Image: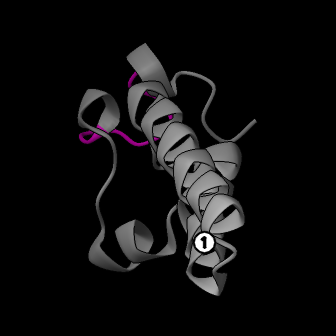
C-alpha cells in the first residue's frame, strides 16, 4: 500500500481525529468514534478514497512515490 497523503495533510488528519475523539470522550458520546477515520488515515498515510479516485498529494501527483517533496518516503 503506497502512501497517497502528504505530510501536511497527515498532520492535519491526526490533529482533527484526536480532537474529535477527545470531544467524544468529553461529551460521553459515541460520535467521537468517527475521529478514528482521520486519525488512522493520518497515521498510516493512505486514504482509500484517494486511491479509488486516483488522487495523490500535490507534491507527487505526476509520479507517485518518486516525486520527492513530502512524499519522498512513499512506498517504504
The residue at the far front in this view is: 27
Q: Is residue 37 magenta?
A: no
Dot 1 lies on which element? Answer: helix
- The reply to whether residue 2 is in sight is no
Q: Main secondary structure of the magenta part?
A: loop
Which residue is label 1 attached to?
32
Q: Residue at x 24, y 40 (%)?
A: 62
67 up-or-down from 28: above or below: above
Spot occupied by residue 66 in the image (x, y as percentages of width and height):
47, 29
Q: Residue at x 66, y 84 (%)?
A: 30
Spot occupied by residue 20 in the image (x, y as percentages of width and height):
53, 58
Quadrant location of residue 43? top right
57 up-or-down from 49: above or below: above
Spot occupied by residue 53 in the image (x, y as percentages of width and height):
28, 75
Spot occupied by residue 25 in the image (x, y as percentages of width and height):
71, 63
Q: Residue at x 56, y 81 (%)?
A: 31
- The region drawn magenta spans 61-68
Amino acid at each position: 500500500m503506497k502512501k497517497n497523503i502528504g505530510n501536511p495533510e497527515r498532520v492535519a488528519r491526526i490533529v482533527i481525529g484526536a480532537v474529535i475523539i477527545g470531544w467524544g470522550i468529553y461529551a460521553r458520546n459515541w460520535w467521537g468514534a468517527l475521529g478514528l477515520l482521520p486519525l488512522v488515515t493520518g497515521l498510516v498515510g493512505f486514504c482509500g478514497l484517494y486511491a479509488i479516485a486516483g488522487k495523490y498529494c500535490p507534491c507527487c501527483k505526476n509520479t507517485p512515490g518518486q516525486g520527492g517533496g513530502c512524499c519522498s518516503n512513499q512506498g517504504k
